[in-house]
Image (cartoon, rainbow, N blue to C red):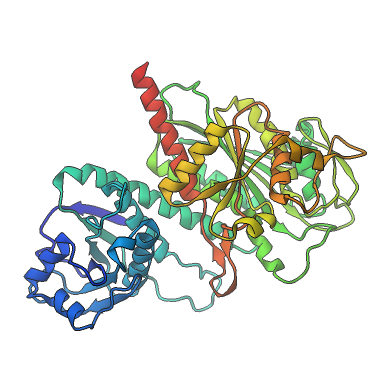
Amino acid sequence: MEFSVQTANPAKTETACLLVPVFKGSDLLPTVAKLDDASERLIGQLLERGDFDATLGNVQLVPFAPGLGAERILLVGLGEREKCQEAAFIKALDAAMAALVKLPIDEASVVFGDVPLADRDPAWKARKVMEAAERAIYRFDQFKSSPAPALSLAKLTLMISDADTVSQVKQGALVGNAIGQGINYTRTLGNLPANICTPRYLAEQAEQLGRDSKGALEVDILDEEALEALGAGSLLSVGRGSKEPTRLIVMKYQGADNVDEAPHVLIGKGITFDTGGISLKPGEGMDEMKFDMCGAASVFGTVKAMLDIKPKLNLVFIVAAAENMPDGRATKPGDIIKTLKGLTVEVLNTDAEGRLVLCDALTYAERFTPASVVDIATLTGAVIVGLGHHATGLLSNDDDLALDLLDAGEGAWDRAWHLPLWDEYQEQLDSNFADLANIGGRPAGTITAACFLSRFADHFPWAHLDIAGTAWHSGKQKGATGRPVGLLTQYLLDRETDAQVENSDG
């Protein structure tokens, strides 16, 4: 979506619609007070008469705005001032944008800049405005014979009162726009049915990103023959039962001034459909197993955001893509496979396949001598039991990396929670017949899954994000969420900031 930043008097700004934030039962914000004065107390009277309830998330369109340059205003409830924190701010924005995109207009203006949020600067607020706008315009209806009419909203103007923050707000809006588009790309990949979004389709998406990047993104696709020659037996074992060939997708972005600077690596689990294999899942809800590639989708979304933001970093993005199906060639419970690292694995449950594709991708990442590696996967149902659908599970072999990711999650408001990765859990993976088993029993299932991955991440700082609870919604709102693109993008931007500080000190 296009955006601009203006410091003009919002009362005189000519716009099709002006979004106006209002607290419940309190004084008007400074910018809103100016609008109220210019409109002969239109806003104040609506509040006093009870014609608008400023409860959090309530919105009301006022189709005429006498005295204002705006053709109409959209009042947005922020709830009680003392309770206005990040979650409330974002909820109000989402409600506002959902109402705004339904209007027959192609542009609008927003005056959310002076909403008071502790420790959040104007750039953060601008970023969240643009993310909310991008989320609101998202539609996934290409398979409907009668899709809804196309949305007309194409541009937002961010109105601010402090001219000194213009550059800050512009940068925040640019990042928010890039993240929002990355989130929507991730949502589309997640929502696509598995008969279309296959490992080969994901590979084609990577190649298209490479072509569109005008040389900024280098793409390598390893097919099954290349994986066999490499020795990636664990990744290949998962796709054995499918007619869809397995792929390892590698995307490289060189943005650092020093071409030899150690890259940061993101690895996504790309199980484009997960039947469970021979350990077949129950039929109820199995349609949602098209979302088992949402880790890979979030990597693609982050690639898209990075290509727009163009950070001065070296980055590598790896997607391990396979389809987990049962047929005569499929891996069976009790089979022993050999990983790229050389360790053998006894497969006790073929539905614990995500770790089998990720372990070879982790070993492959060693060749880049990475500064950090983060894998993202819809790995365990156990993380939903522990954390529900609000927080992503985080486990790591490096406390500094874990803290960096937690901070990024807070900054992006795409939060994670740190779980332990103690040695005591490792023995649950003991096998009588191989170096390790692929499951460790019911207790601490999320942790033992990460313990398995940790065996293949002993040469670099590594973290694992289990997004099984946050990657998609079920029920009437079924669909991919686009998480954790915000967290991942913020993490990488923070690394750019760290590198700039180090270079300036040096």
Residue 212 shows in this picture: no
Q: Where is residue 83 in the image (x, y as percent from the top left)?
A: 34, 62
Q: Residue at the spot x=76%, y=36% of the render?
A: 232
Residues 223 and 346: in front is 346
- In the image, farthest residue toward the top: 506
| Residue 345 shows in this picture | yes
Is 225 placed left or right of 83 in the picture? right
* Number of marks drawn: 0
The image quadrant that residue 233 belongs to is top right
| Residue 174 percent coordinates (x, y) | 33, 47
Q: In this view, does 489 lie above or below 151?
A: above
Q: In the picture provided, is 504 more to the left or to the right than 431?
A: left
Residue at 69%, 56% (x, y): give it: 382
Placement of the N terminus among the 4 image quadrants: bottom left
Taking 445 as reference, is 90 left or right?
A: left
- The answer to which of 247 and 174 lies nearer the viewer is 174
Taking the spot 40% from the left edge, 75% from the top edge, the residue there is 149
Q: Residue 158 is drawn in which quadrant?
A: bottom left
Rendered residue at 48%/75% (across/down): 147
Q: Position of residue 12 (x, y in %)?
A: 9, 64
Residue 314 located left or right of residue 463: left
* Residue that extends furthest to the front in the rendered view of this protein: 82
- Relative to 462, is 386 above or below? below
Q: Quadrant of the C terminus?
A: top left
Can you give x and y, in whole percent of width and height, for residue 102 in the image?
A: 34, 74
